[in-house]
Image: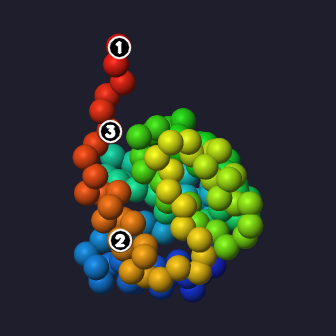
Amino acid sequence: MDDEQALCEATRHYLAQCGYSLLTARDGVEAITRFLQHQARLRLVLTDMVMPGLDGAPFIRTLRRIRPDIPIIAMSGIPGQRQAAEEAGGPGLRFLEKPFAGEELLRLLQDILNAPPPAPPEP
């Protein structure tokens, strides 16, 4: 999710060339709608932190209520957004500082998606 259309399209195109399939959204409301429609097949969420309408932190908190186990990568180039993302996302949230190279995003995706699933909570 990113409201910067050029960044969203460039990221989608780059990751598609690397073999990933993506759903894109331009704001938090659209992203939540698409997430609910496709959540069974989604393995990770990549979101900008500063968005019109439903901003990054409330978006992340909403995702955590819907599906607490979904890996989330938050991104921003604005100071202070890392802390807001980490507070909203809790353990397991990853953060990318903008601007970033495509290879940096690709390594992070591979690291997350190839990681073993988290252990179930103990009763």
**36 or 92, nearer to the observer:** 92
Element carrying mark 2: helix
| Residue topped by disc 2 | 107
Q: Residue at x 59, y 71 (%)?
A: 97
Instruction: Classify mark 2: residues with Cα within 10 Å, few (<14), some (14-19) or many (20+).
Output: few
Is 107 left, or right, of 66 in this rendering? left
Q: Earlier in the sequence, mark 1 or mark 3?
A: 3
Q: Position of residue 59 (x, y in %)?
A: 62, 50
Q: Position of residue 72 (x, y in %)?
A: 48, 54
Element carrying mark 3: loop
Q: Kindly identify the amino acid type of the residue bearing the numbered disc 3.
A: Pro
Q: Quadrant of residue 42?
A: bottom left
Q: Kindly identify the amino acid type of the residue bearing the numbered disc 2.
A: Arg
| Residue topped by disc 3 | 118
| Residue topped by disc 1 | 123
Question: In the rendered view, would you say 21 is above or below 43?
Answer: below
Q: Earlier in the sequence, mark 2 or mark 1?
A: 2
Instruction: Classify mark 3: residues with Cα within 10 Å, few (<14), some (14-19) or many (20+).
Output: few
Q: Kindly identify the amino acid type of the residue bearing the numbered disc 1.
A: Pro
Q: CA distance from mark 1 to mark 3?
A: 15 Å
Q: CA distance from mark 2 to mark 1?
A: 34 Å
Q: CA distance from mark 3 to mark 2?
A: 20 Å
Q: Position of residue 79 (x, y in %)?
A: 74, 67
Quarter of the figure that contains the N terminus:
bottom right
Instruction: Classify mark 1: residues with Cα within 10 Å, few (<14), some (14-19) or many (20+).
Output: few
Q: Residue at x 67, y 47 (%)?
A: 58
Q: Residue at x 31, y 28 (%)?
A: 120
Element carrying mark 1: loop
